[in-house]
Image (cartoon, rainbow, N blue to C red):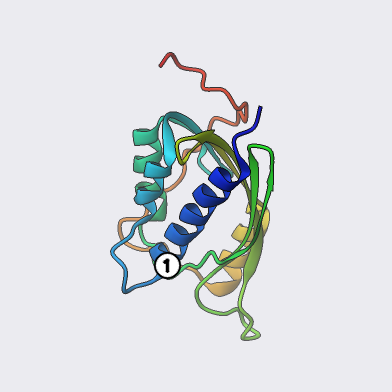
Amino acid sequence: MPHDRSEIELAVSRYCDLRRRIEDPGEAASWADLADLFTEDAVYIDPAWGRIEGREEIRAFMHDSMVGLDDWRFPIEFTAIEGDDVVIKWTQILPGTDATGGVRTQSGFSRLIYAGDGRFRYEEDLLNMTHVMEDLAATGFQVPAGFHFPPAEPDRDVSIEPRRAG
């Protein structure tokens, strides 16, 4: 039985608000703060980094994966809720422009599963990494100091349930 829709809407609103505050230079929020919105045993799937399990592992991933990407933007276009499932449509906007002066963007989606008590137990981000790599080349992206590369062979298991024991 899904949770009460108003409870899920409130959790989604908190999630989206935090995402907006993360991108606001006047706020003290960071990507790692998103981990607080997940259960202890949550699963997070990233298109480049693969599967991450556990709130503290998600916190570390959020920090490590965003080092040097402070000027990247990820505005949210809309959200949709069906039962405990949430879809968030967002855009990734790269800094700089290509040779024609155009801004490079990619379309992204996140699927979250609500777990209750204001927290999510699963997030899977979908983004075409081929487009990302093409756009990085087109804008002349230079790897910033402190940048962390994703693993060479990320775990591609997208199953919802955590695999490790609690």
- Name the residue furthest right: 82
Residue 36: x percent and y percent?
A: 37, 43
**Residue at left 64%, top 45%?**
86
Picture quadrant where residue 61 is located? top left
For residue 129, above or below residue 59: below
For the question of whether residue 153 can be seen, the reply is no
For the question of whether residue 4 can be seen, the reply is yes
**Residue at left 63%, top 37%?**
84
Picture quadrant where residue 83 is located? top right
Q: Amino acid at mark 1?
A: Glu
The answer to which of 65 and 36 lies nearer the viewer is 36
Left or right of 144 in this view: 122:
right
Kindly identify which residue carries mark 1.
23
* Numbered label tally: 1
Residue 6: x percent and y percent?
A: 58, 47
Residue 99: x percent and y percent?
A: 62, 82
* Label 1: element kind: helix
For residue 164, above or below residue 99: above
Left or right of 90 in this view: 61:
left
The answer to which of 64 and 88 lies nearer the viewer is 88
The answer to which of 5 and 28 lies nearer the viewer is 5
In which quadrant will I find the C terminus? top left
Left or right of 156 in this view: 30:
left
In which quadrant will I find the N terminus? top right
Residue 127: x percent and y percent?
A: 64, 52
